[in-house]
Image (cartoon, helix red, strand yellow):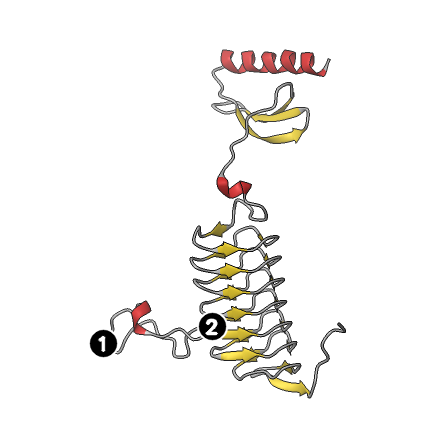
Amino acid sequence: VASALGLLFGGMLDAWLETHGVTPLIIGEFDDSALIKTFGQGGAGIFVAPRAIEAPRATSRRSAMAGIVPSADVSPDAQSGDGSSVWHLAQVREGAVLGANCIIGRGAYIGTGVVMGDNCKVQNYALVYEPAVLEDGVFVGPAVVFTNDHYARAINADGSIKSAHDWEPVAVTVRTGASVGARSVCVAPVTIGRWALVAAGSVVVDDVPDFALVAGVPARRCLAAWPAPAA
């Protein structure tokens, strides 16, 4: 019955569209038994027609890759471990290496050649510039920035625009289990120690020892030791 109704109403709609010179455009799915069509060329509104036959869907290698949504920009030269996911509008550049079970949030940026261990989380809109290194289990909060130029300039002394050959990138290194809170800035070159915690909104300009808690602008040590999670 559903198939018959689908053919009937679908046929009636197609006949009406053809009579009025309207080209239908399928823009999405209403449910398993309906298609949404819009009217163009003078028509107006949305019509939900019962669905009789599955509409063909375009597929691509990108959409078939597990864990990487179609709107993400992942270089074919990047490597991603099993179980890792890259969300909407995130960019993973050439030569980047993501370990297993990593999560790259919406709008995040992973620079060329950045290396990440297993089980890392890079939250929405974080910017991880090369040549950063994240060991296993690192947490990078929303809108965090890892810089890579200690003497940033747009131009050289002669007024010419600086190119990649005119400066040497420097790294932020984050050791196992460390966490960097939301909107923090790590000014390279710095190392965040094992299981250290950088409070939200901090500006890190010096190395952070293992298990330390730092906060502020510039970030200062708040506790002599920050306990690692129980094994």
Q: Quadrant of the N terminus?
A: top right
Residue 114 location (% of width, % of height): 48, 65
Please tell me which residue is depicted at 44% across the width and 50% down the height of the picture. 76
> Dots 1 and 2: beta carbons under 8 Å?
no
Task: Kindly tell me whether residue 162 is visible in this rendering.
Answer: no
What amino acid type is highlighted by mark number 1?
Answer: Asp
Q: Is the residue 71 above or below the residue 128 in the image?
A: above
Please tell me which residue is depicted at 69% across the width and 88% down the height of the picture. 224
The single residue placed furthest to the bottom in the displayed view is 224
Q: Is the residue 68 above or below the residue 165 in the image?
A: above
The single residue placed furthest to the right in the displayed view is 230
Relative to 1, is 112 on the left or the right? left
Relative to 132, is 141 on the left or the right? right
User: So how many labels did they put on this image?
Assistant: 2
**Which labelled disc corresponds to residue 147?**
2
Please tell me which residue is depicted at 43% across the width and 75% down the height of the picture. 170
Residue 135 location (% of width, % of height): 57, 69
Q: In the picture, residue 152 is in which quadrant?
A: bottom left
Between marks 1 and 2, how big is the CA–CA gap?
Answer: 25 Å
Mark 1 or 2, closer to the camera: 2
Pointer 1: residues within 10 angstroms few (<14), some, or many (20+)?
few
Residue bearing the label numbered 1? 158
Please tell me which residue is depicted at 25% across the width and 73% down the height of the picture. 159
Chain-order first, disc 1 or disc 2: 2
Helix, strand or loop under label 2: loop
Q: Quadrant of the C terminus?
A: bottom right
Task: Kindly tell me whether residue 92 is visible in this rendering.
Answer: yes
Helix, strand or loop under label 1: loop
- Residue 86 or residue 48, whichever sits in front: 86
